[in-house]
Amino acid sequence: MKIFITGATGYIGNRLTYVLANNNNDVHILVRDLKSKNIPVSKNIKVFQGDLCDFNSIYQAMKGCEYVYHAAAFTD
């Protein structure tokens, strides 16, 4: 199944992303900075660059996903 996860570079979102990807799910994640050292990497993880405040970014990353896990938080 396809799953969209927000907050995948944070502690909980990162662990959740790996667990779901390692169970043969296709996981889509949205990250602000592609240079972040916390981006999870796996053959089942597809990384999208964008911002949660931008509808088009979210739409592109969520396209085709059946489930959403929202683990993102507002940070300065």
Image (spheres, rainbow, N blue to C red):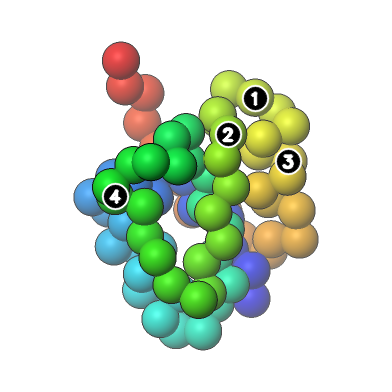
Q: Residue furthest top?
A: 76
Q: Are marks 1 and 2 in contact (CB under 8 Å)?
A: yes
Q: x, y (%) of residue 56? A: 74, 32
Q: Report the side of 4 relative to 60 (left or right).
A: left
CA distance separating discs 2 and 3: 10 Å
State the residue position of label 3.
Answer: 59
State the residue position of label 4.
Answer: 38
Q: Report the side of 8 relative to 37 (left or right).
A: right
Q: Nearer the viewer, mark 2 or mark 3?
A: 2
Labels 4 and 2: the sequence-earlier one: 4
Q: Are marks 3 and 1 in contact (CB under 8 Å)?
A: no
State the residue position of label 1.
Answer: 54
Q: Nearer the viewer, mark 1 or mark 4?
A: 4
Q: x, y (%) of residue 57? A: 67, 35
Residue 13 in view (yes/no): no
State the residue position of label 2.
Answer: 50
Q: Quadrant of the N terminus?
A: bottom right
